[in-house]
Amino acid sequence: MPPAARPTQPAPSYRWLVLLSCSAAMFGNYYVFDALYPVTPLLEKTFGFTGEQVGLLDTSYNVAALLTLIAGGILVDRLGTARSALLFGAIGALGSLLIAVLPAILPGHAAAGMMAGRFVLGVGSESFIVAATTVVGRWFKGREISFALAIQLLIARLGSYAADWSPNVTSLFGSWQPPLLLAAALGGVWLLFAGVYAGLETNAARRYGMARAGATDKLVLSDLVRFDRAYWWVVGLCVAFYATIFPFRTFANLFLTDFHGVTNEIAGRLKSVLPLLSMIGMPVFGLIADRFGKRALLMAVGSALLVPPFLLMAYTRLPLELSMAFLGVAFALVPAVLWPAVTYLVPDARLGSAYALMTFCQQVGWAAMSWGMGKVKDVAGASASHPAGWLPVMWMLAVLASAGFVFSFLLWRSERGGRGHGLERAKAGAAAAA
C-alpha cells in the first residue's frame, strides 16, 4: 500500500499559529517602545530633560529605522526570514536593556545614553514590524487579511495599553529606572516569540516546500516612480496619521499633567484609551472592510476624527475622555484599513518593498514632528507654570491631522472612478496594478 501523500499546504490553523506567535513578539516590541513615555516626567525631574531632548528620544529611534530601511533586505535576502526575525528581535531586546541601564552608567550624559539605546531599539524594532506585516500580507491575502492584520495589531497594542497603565503600579515609579527594567524583561519576551515564529517558518519551508514567506524587501529607489498614484495617497495618509498619533503619545503625559493638572497616573489612564479602543475596534473594522468594502471611505472617516480632539483639549472644558475616545476610534479605524489596502495597490512581488517604502516615509514624518514638537514646546516655554505654551504644539497636531484627511479624501475620490483598485468593493475584482 503506497504511503499517504504529504499535504502540500499547511492546515488553516497553521496560518493562525504563525499569526499568534508573530503577534506575541509584537506585544513585547510595542511595550518596550511605549514604556518610555510614562517615565518622561521623572526624566525631567531627575536629569533635567528638555522638551527637545524628549522629542529626540523618538527621533533617534526614527533615524535608526530610516538607516535600516535604506539598507534593508540585504540580511533578509542572505539569512532568510526566520533567522532575520531572531536577529532583529535580539537587537531590539538589546536596545531595551541599553535604555534602562545607560543613563545610570552615564548620569552626566543621560540623554545621550538613552538616545543610543533608542537608536539600537529602532534598528531592531521597525525591521521586525515590516517583516511581521509582510508575513501576514502573504499568508492571509485573499483570506481575511484585514481581520488578520487587525488581530496582529490588537495583540501588539495590548503591549502599548499595558505600558500606558504601568504608572498605576506605584511601586515601579519611585524612580525612573524600574519601569524601564521591566520593559527590558518584556524585550526578552519579544525575542522568545520571535524564535517561536522563526521555528514555524522554518518548519513550513521544510515540511511543505513553501517559499520563505514575509521577506522584508529592500527599499528599491526605482519604486518611487513605479507605484500607482493611489499608493502615494495611502503613503501620505500614513505619514500624516502616524506623525500625529505617535508624537502626541510621546508628549501626552507631559501635556496632560502640565495643561490639565492631572496626575501622571491619570494621564496614563487617559492615554490608554487609545490602544484600548484600538484593540476593540480594529478587528471589528477589519471585518467590516472585508465584508462590505468601502475602505477608502472608512479611511476618510477615521482621518476626519483625528482633527477635533487636539483643539477640544486646548480650548474647551469638555471631558478629556471625549477627546481620547475620538483619537482611539481613529487609531482603530485607519490602521485596520490602511495597511491591508496596500495589498490591493501593488502586486505580491513588490509587497515587501511597498511596506518598507511606506514605513520609511512614515519614519521621516514622525522623526521631524517629534523633534519639532519638542522644540516648539521649549521655545513657547510650555510647563505647568505656563500651560499656554502648549497651544502651538496642539495646533501643529491639528494641522497635520487635517493634511491626513486631505490625502484620504483624494484616495476616496480616485477609487470612485473607473480606474479604482477595488478598495471600495467587498472583494478585489482584479490583481493589484503593476
Image (spheres, rainbow, N blue to C red):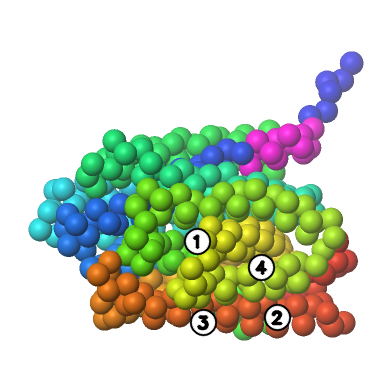
Q: Nearer the viewer, residue 31 or 226?
A: 31
- Taking the spot 48% from the left edge, 68% from the top edge, the residue there is 317
Percent of width and height locating residue 300: 70, 73
- Going by the numbered disc 2, the residue's amino acid type is Phe
Residue 233: x %, y % from top left: 65, 79
Q: With 333 as the anchor, is 84 left or right in this view?
A: left
Q: Position of residue 80 (x, y in %)?
A: 53, 49
- Mark 1–mark 4 Cα distance, whole angstroms, equals 19 Å
For disc 3, the marked residue is: 399
Viewer-nearest of discs 1 and 2: 1
The residue depicted at 63 percent of the width and 70 percent of the height is 305
Magenta span dominant secondary structure:
helix
Does residue 32 appear in the picture of this structure? no
Residue on which disc 4 sits = 302
Q: Are marks 3 and 1 in contact (CB under 8 Å)?
A: no
Element at label 4: helix
Q: Quadrant of residue 55?
A: bottom left
**Callout 3, which amino acid?**
Val
Cα distance, mark 3 to mark 2? Answer: 16 Å
Give the SS element for disc 3: helix
Element assignment for label 2: helix
Q: Which range is magenta?
A: 7-19
